[in-house]
Image (tube, helix red, strand yellow):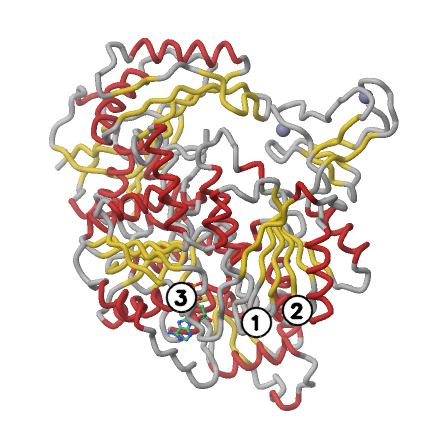
Amino acid sequence: MTQILKIALDIPLDTLFDYRAEEVSTEDVGRRVLVSFGRRKMVGLIVSLANLSDLPAASIKPVLKIFRDTPALAPDILKLLQFCANYYHHPLGEVIFTALPQRLRSDQAAAFPQQISYVLNKAAPHLDDLPLRAVVKRKLLTHLCQDSGIAREALLALSPSASKHIREMLTTGWITQQQENRPKLLAPPVSGPLPQLPALNAEQAAVIDGCSPAGFSATLLLGITGSGKTEVYLRLTAIQLEQGRQVLVLVPEINLTPQLEARFQSRFPDVPVVSLHSSLNDSERLRHWLLAQSGEARIVLGTRLSVFTPMPELGLIIVDEEHDSSFKQQDGLRYSARDMAAARAKQLNIPILMGSATPALESYHNALAGRYRLQRLSRRAVEEAQLPSIRCVDMRNEKPDDGLSATLLQALEKNLEHGSQSLVFINRRGYAPVLLCNQCGWLAPCPRCTSRLVVHLRERRLRCHHCGHEERIPRACPGCGNPDLAPLGQGTQRLEDALAQHFPAARILRIDRDSTRRKHALREMLQDVHEERVDILVGTQILAKGHDFKRLTLVGALNVDGALYSADFRAAERLFAQLMQVAGRAGRAAEPGTVLIQTQFPDHPLFDALRHQDYDAFATTQLVERKQAGFPPFCHQALLRAEATHLETALAFLHQAKKMALPIPAAITLYDAVPAPMARLAGRERAQLLVQADERRDLQQFLRHWNANLNNLKARQVRWSLDVDPLDF
Ligand code: ADP
Ligand code: ZN
Ligand code: ZN
């Protein structure tokens, strides 16, 4: 019998397309198909079956192929994606294809990608016959002895140079390569006895008791750094695994938190754990995704996109560092993975746990309003570990040397003598944020953005950190010919140089996006820190996250004042979270830590709350301010963004869009179209229009009508998008 298929396609039209096919059943809903669309062939996905179409029968084309080599997308995922499409007012087809791994977006066969594994041959030497200094080979052999047919990825995870040694061992015939269809466990077997679990403290036990393992509940876990949140995640995960359920753990940026992955793998050595993040290649990504979908992987550890991973037996979702803005996608489908995770938990009727030392004010507000349960961990978990003492260095009384106050320099010196590690934090990479001509005031601008170029002195280049534009450092000022151009302000490179001058004997390591570009670079650097080959670390917020440096006892923070009086109402919240995080790096073990914050405004209430590490105090004052100003979480916002070659074109589109909204419902505030704070980006002019309502329901209802009209609006030469719950303006 011929059936009508409602097909979602990856195109920016908010509609499904009718095709027909013979011999399809409801089992095919969620399967991918190949169809001809216009003159192209496209991959689509069957969203539903129907008996009738509004189109004349003759114009309905047959599907060319139904891909039955991979399982259909489960109904619960389709439902989640549908919710996502409705909430963000984004075409369902684009939402579906954003969520699928790249390989499934194309018409390539997507059978289980073959997994490469290795077996040990007789030709291989005995472990005892290998010299001790052959560290990596010994490691590889140890694992190969334990398990015949160990997955390539498991071996690669053992060392950055594993791949080179595997090649050598293949040539010498020590090992043989196999290709398998069946997936293997990805967690490398752990050798030796299982680590002893710490006894939970009373607070941890209370949190675990409070999280019922079944039924929907949303819990916000407010726990200072080092208070044992991860231990709580592990215990709750164990409970789910015992009950035969899968667990999804969302993290902001996985390559920044390799320790978390390692902790999950070593806690559950026999349990298949897969990770899903952007540094996997397409076939790894597909394999991990399929393992989750088939239920073989029991734990999925992933970044924001993994919130959509099919997991047939999902029993718990954990969102670590739930406040982190990288959970919100900033282009295309601008979804919040944290919010989608909460929606998923609700749909599946399972618990969700969101953890942070500095929750997003939205989440904290939800907890105060009773929508989330609030649980606390208020002490560091390790008995001796003390909270660091946090002090401001009053920069009004200092004459800083290359940005470094005498107070901080002295503290660094003392720490060096003491043999402890220090960290100098500055959230700006490069040598200096601006290049200045002292004679005419020229500041090197980015030709494509409303921004300044950053000086990268070592490469003798100027770079735009927004669009990637690069040029040579000019020999003279293009305005007045003055050859004496001066880098202004501090970046990580300049600090590194300055510290090297002050402390010539110290081993200094810079960790930022530039120094860690190479694959494995970050992992190697972190290893150097752990193995105490580093005295002073200089770095950006990469360093703030999740790392547990046992010997680190001093943290200095520079250039934080910009966020105190910023036009962005979230700047203070972000600064507080960042400083709490860097402060959390100090004194993780027995030695107490000290944090010195250089500022012109030591009396600012933000620092007061920070000194007492009092998130509640900070959040409470912020919430009062937000309420007075009518900002989120006391209202709900959406931003209509438009960009074009000329600003007038973008603004004209938004004016028209505003007109279409008339008459504006009483519950809605529609502001005027204005240029974006960064009006020019990568050669495009940008403008925006803000919509606001007290109630989410009113906003959603308005957006639904408005968006439908916007889709009919002529938008020649304008690219526009709707951003619901925008974080960046
Ligand atoms: P967080 O995730 O909140 O930063 P962690 O879970 O990483 O905290 O815990 C910090 C340190 O304390 C880790 O080294 C961890 O092994 C240890 N730890 C956690 N819970 C306990 C406990 N109940 N007893 C002893 N040590 C603990
Ligand atoms: Zn000049
Ligand atoms: Zn630029």
Residue shown at the point (40%, 82%) measured from the top left: 196
User: Which residue in the protein does label 3 denote?
Assistant: 379
Residue shown at the point (23%, 68%) measured from the top left: 209
Q: Examine the rendered structure and indicate whether residue 452 appears above or below residue 288.
A: above
The numbered mark at residue 526 is none
Between disc 3 and disc 2, whose residue precedes? 3
Residue 616 x, y percent position in the rendering: 37, 50
Q: Examine the rendered structure and indicate whether residue 404 appears above or below residue 521.
A: above
Q: Amino acid at mark 1?
A: Glu
Query: Quadrant where the N terminus lies?
Result: top left
Q: Amino acid at mark 3?
A: Arg
Residue shown at the point (45%, 77%) measured from the top left: 189
User: Which residue in the protein does label 1 denote?
Assistant: 591
- Structural distance between the alpha carbons of marks 3 and 1: 16 Å
When asked about the image quadrant of residue 473, the answer is: top right
Left or right placement of residue 343 versus residue 653 in this view: left
Q: Nearer the viewer, residue 451 or 37?
A: 451
- Structural distance between the alpha carbons of marks 1 and 2: 9 Å
Between disc 3 and disc 1, whose residue precedes? 3
Between disc 1 and disc 2, whose residue precedes? 2
Residue 630 x, y percent position in the rendering: 33, 28
Q: Residues within 10 Å of mark 1 (few under 14, many from 20)?
A: some
Q: Is residue 616 among what the camera can see?
A: yes
**Disc 1 vs disc 2: Cβ atoms closer than 8 Å?**
yes
User: Which residue in the protein does label 2 denote?
Assistant: 420
Q: Nearer the viewer, residue 21 or 622?
A: 622
